[in-house]
């Protein structure tokens, strides 16, 4: 089975632009979570979706939004990008919201 | 709120030797899970080992084992017979037993270098 896949792997954006990151969960997994990992730090929780509904939100501004599609894939959107949004964005999937999470390889976002 | 503290930003070990990475956490819950993840330069977060708080026996996975001290809220990772491929960032993670994955907290990580 394929693992969690994220696209794109790398991305460079300009301040003020908008970005969409994509995540495909492991087959059979209905929950997707998003994390931001700034260089040298541990991952910080952004969102969790389960069965297409938002089940949790971390301490991030409203510029960050997400959604989950009927096939359980997910998109993370960030509007009005700031330099501080530069980070590795990780997606993790699990069968349910409270079962073991498996991570993708992440999308490296650089805002210039 | 839960906190996870990894007090060693960097550690190094000689190949074939043993190294211990420390982790302490703070929680008011009695039932929870603890994890160690490895993040190599490829960036993918890989689960190394997990421990259920209700289990007294320390978890082991091949060369990896933990020393779980519930009263002290300590959860250290021991890597035996270190290999070059063990070089990576290691993150300790806490999650409430009944909670969703959003109620999990990562430490800031320990960078492990393995010297040949």
Image: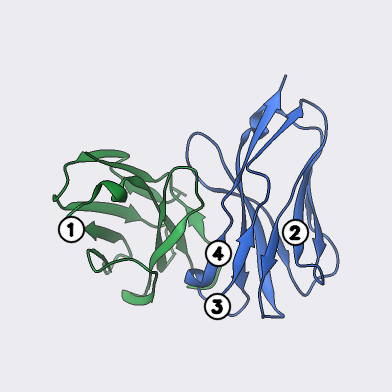
Chain colours: A green, B blue
Mark 3 neighbour class, 10 Å CA radius: few under 14, some 14 to 19, many 20 or more: few
Callout 2 secondary element: strand
Q: Position of residue B5 (x, y in %)?
A: 64, 58
Chain containing mark 3: B
Q: Position of residue A49 (x, y in %)?
A: 37, 71
Q: Nearer the viewer, mark 3 or mark 4?
A: 4
Mark 3 sits on what residue?
Answer: B99
Q: Are marks 2 and 4 in contact (CB under 8 Å)?
A: no
Residue B105 is marked as 4
Q: Is residue B3 above or below residue A78?
A: below
Q: Are marks 3 and 1 in contact (CB under 8 Å)?
A: no
Lower position in the chain sequence, tag 3 or tag 4: 3
Residue under the point 64% across and 32% down: B87
- The one nearer the camera, B108 or A94, is B108
Q: Are marks 3 and 2 on the same chain?
A: yes
Q: Is residue A78 above or below residue A97?
A: above
| Quadrant location, the C terminus of chain A | top left
Q: Quadrant of residue A59?
A: bottom left
Q: Are marks 3 and 4 on the same chain?
A: yes
Q: Is residue B21 above or below residue B30?
A: above
Mark 2 sits on what residue?
Answer: B75
Mark 1 sits on what residue?
Answer: A79
Residue under the point 59% across and 71% down: B2
Q: Position of residue B69 (x, y in %)?
A: 82, 65
Q: Residue furthest left?
A: A17
Lower position in the chain sequence, tag 3 or tag 2: 2
Q: Position of residue B97 (x, y in %)?
A: 63, 76
């Amino acid at each position: 089975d394929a693992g969690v896949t994220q696209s794109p792997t790398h991305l460079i954006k300009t301040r003020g632009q908008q970005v969409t990151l994509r995540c495909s969960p492991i087959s059979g997994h209905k929950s997707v979570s998003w994390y931001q990992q700034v260089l040298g730090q541990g991952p910080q929780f952004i969102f969790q979706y389960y069965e297409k509904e938002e089940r949790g939100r971390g301490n991030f501004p409203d510029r960050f939004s997400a959604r989950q599609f009927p096939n359980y894939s997910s998109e993370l959107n960030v509007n009005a990008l700031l330099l501080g949004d530069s980070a590795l964005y990780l997606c993790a999937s699990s069968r349910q919201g409270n079962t073991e999470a498996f991570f993708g390889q992440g999308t490296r976002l650089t805002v210039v | 709120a839960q906190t996870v503290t990894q007090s060693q930003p960097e550690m190094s070990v000689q190949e074939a030797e043993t190294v211990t990475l420390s982790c302490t956490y703070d929680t008011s819950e009695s039932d929870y899970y603890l994890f160690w993840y490895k993040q190599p330069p490829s960036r993918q977060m890989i689960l190394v080992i997990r421990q259920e708080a209700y289990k007294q026996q320390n978890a082991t996975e091949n060369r990896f084992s933990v020393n779980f001290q519930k009263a002290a809220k300590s959860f250290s990772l021991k890597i035996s017979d270190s290999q070059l491929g063990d070089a990576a960032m290691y993150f300790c993670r806490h999650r409430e037993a009944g909670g969703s994955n959003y109620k999990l907290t990562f430490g800031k990580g320990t960078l492990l270098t393995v010297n040949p």
